[in-house]
Structure formats: structure tokens, C-alpha cells
């Protein structure tokens, strides 16, 4: 029987992106293929942490059901991490158990594992994809992001976290990448929530980058991490 490595399963509101404020059940998987400076869930990077739970598909689904029954008006399951696509087969099996329950599926991903995404794309109702800037993650992922975006999805939006280290050249490259695929894809600029040695970008610069993006893209917004502002999960 297949098992997944899960950091936690809980209900809250979505704190990031264009669906901020929407109630969801979050399945936070353990393990990540990247090491970003601004990661706000470092406990989910490792798959050997003592707090990580090894759960079967039915156990994961059971815990999701408990959260749905506990909180009214939740009809979306968010698969997050870590990087949830590392456990794509588990996600696929969990989704199959909710096929006829009028539940929608939301994927929050770093946008690198495009081959795994192509297998799951049709089962997802919403996709929140990050573009990881090299200044924060220490490596370029332009090719992977481009391939990811080629797997078109009607309800995808892109998020770029901006830190004090983010620069004009890499941001412009990200905007050009999006424009080359589909300029109507919503882009969210997310000012980093300072953590450790990671510093925030001056807001005047964020507004300047937004103006740059708006010259090429149709839907650009600035949305901070709302759950961090509210002090909730």
C-alpha cells in the first residue's frame, strides 16, 4: 500500500495569491527539491523529521474528511509543501477518493517538476505556480518553468516572491517568459515576509517592477502573505 510523507493536514484560509481569504483544507507534504532563502515552512523540507507522518492514501483522505466536517463552507483541498509534486502518485490517489464529492483541487507548486504536473494537470481546478528567481534559490529554473507553463491550465496564476536581493534583469526575464506563453496569466508579486537574513524589497521598487510587468502582461497585482499578517497558519 502506497504511503505519503505528510507534515500536517489542517483547515485555514488561503494566505497567498489571488485566492487569498478562501477557506481550504491544506495537505502539506514533506520534502522539497529546492532550497530557497525565503522558505517559510523549513520544517517541511525534510522527509526524515520526527514530526513527519507516514500516512496511507485512505488515512490522508480520512483526515481531510475530518477537517471538511469540522469547518463549514470548505470545498477546496490545497496540496502544498514542501513540494507536493514529489508525491504526485499519492495526490492522484487522494483525488480519486473525492471524485464525486463536489470538492475542488488546488495545487501550490514551485513550478519545476513539469513532467509530474503534466500527469495531474487535468485533475486540478486551480494551480498556484511560483517562478523562482535565481537570486533567492541559487540556481536558474527558466527552462523548467517554461516547460511547466506549456502544460496549459485555465485556472493557473503565477507568483514571484520579491526580496531585497531580487534584481531587474531576472524579474524582466520572468515577465518575458510569461508573456511568451500567455500574457493573460495572472501574475502576483509577493513581497517577502522577512525571515532570518532575508530582507524585504523597498515598496517603491516593488511598484516599479509592477509597472514593468504591466507593460507586457494583462493582470498584475501585489499581494503579501495574508496569513502571516493575520498570524495564522
Image: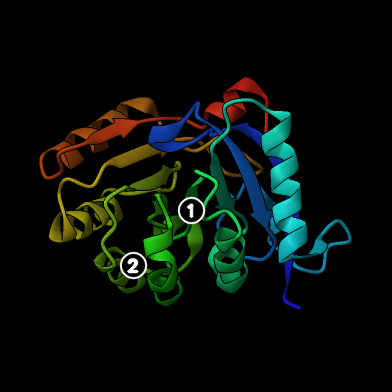
The answer to whether residue 226 shows anywhere in this view is: yes
Q: Earlier in the sequence, mark 2 or mark 1?
A: 1
How many numbered discs sit on the rendered protein? Answer: 2
Callout 1 secondary element: strand
Residue drawn where x is 47% and y is 59% of the image = 110
Residue drawn where x is 67% and y is 49% of the image = 41
Q: Quadrant of the C terminus?
A: top right
Residue 107 image label: 1
Q: Nearer the viewer, residue 197 or 15?
A: 15
Judged from this view, the residue extending furthest toward the left is 215
Horizontal side, residue 55 vs residue 118: left or right: right
Horizontal side, residue 213 vs residue 36: left or right: left
Q: Are marks 2 and 1 in contact (CB under 8 Å)?
A: no
Residue 161 x, y percent position in the rendering: 43, 44
Residue 2 x, y percent position in the rendering: 72, 76
Residue 215 image label: none
Between circles 2 and 1, the one closer to the viewer is 1
The answer to whether residue 43 shows anywhere in this view is: no
Instruction: Look at mark 2 in the image and give the residue it sits on.
Output: 148
Label 2 environment density (alpha carbons within 10 Å; few <14, some 14–19, many ≥20): many
Residue drawn where x is 55% and y is 46% of the image = 101
Q: Quadrant of the N terminus?
A: bottom right
Q: Nearer the viewer, residue 22 or 188?
A: 22
Amino acid at each position: 500500500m502506497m504511503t505519503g510523507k505528510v507534515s500536517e493536514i489542517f483547515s485555514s484560509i488561503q494566505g497567498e495569491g489571488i485566492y487569498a481569504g478562501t477557506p481550504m483544507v491544506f495537505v502539506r507534504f514533506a520534502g522539497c527539491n529546492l532550497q530557497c532563502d525565503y522558505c517559510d515552512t523549513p520544517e517541511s523540507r525534510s522527509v526524515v523529521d520526527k514530526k513527519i507522518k507516514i500516512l496511507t492514501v485512505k488515512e490522508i483522505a480520512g483526515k481531510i474528511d475530518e477537517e471538511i466536517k469540522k469547518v463549514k463552507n470548505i470545498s477546496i483541498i490545497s496540496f502544498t509543501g514542501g513540494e507536493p509534486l514529489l508525491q504526485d502518485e499519492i495526490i492522484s490517489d487522494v483525488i480519486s477518493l473525492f471524485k464525486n464529492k463536489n470538492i475542488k483541487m488546488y495545487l501550490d507548486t514551485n513550478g519545476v517538476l513539469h513532467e509530474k504536473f503534466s500527469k495531474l494537470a487535468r485533475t486540478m481546478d486551480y494551480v498556484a505556480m511560483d517562478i523562482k528567481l535565481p537570486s533567492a534559490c541559487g540556481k536558474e529554473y527558466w527552462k523548467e518553468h517554461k516547460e511547466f507553463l506549456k502544460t496549459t491550465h485555465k485556472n493557473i496564476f503565477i507568483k514571484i516572491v520579491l526580496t531585497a536581493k531580487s534584481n531587474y534583469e531576472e524579474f524582466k526575464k520572468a515577465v518575458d517568459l510569461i508573456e511568451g506563453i500567455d500574457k493573460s496569466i495572472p501574475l502576483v508579486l509577493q513581497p517577502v515576509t522577512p525571515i532570518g537574513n532575508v530582507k524585504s524589497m523597498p515598496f517603491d521598487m516593488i511598484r516599479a517592477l509592477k509597472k514593468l510587468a504591466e507593460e507586457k502582461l494583462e493582470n498584475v497585482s501585489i499581494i503579501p502573505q495574508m496569513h502571516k499578517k493575520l498570524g495564522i497558519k
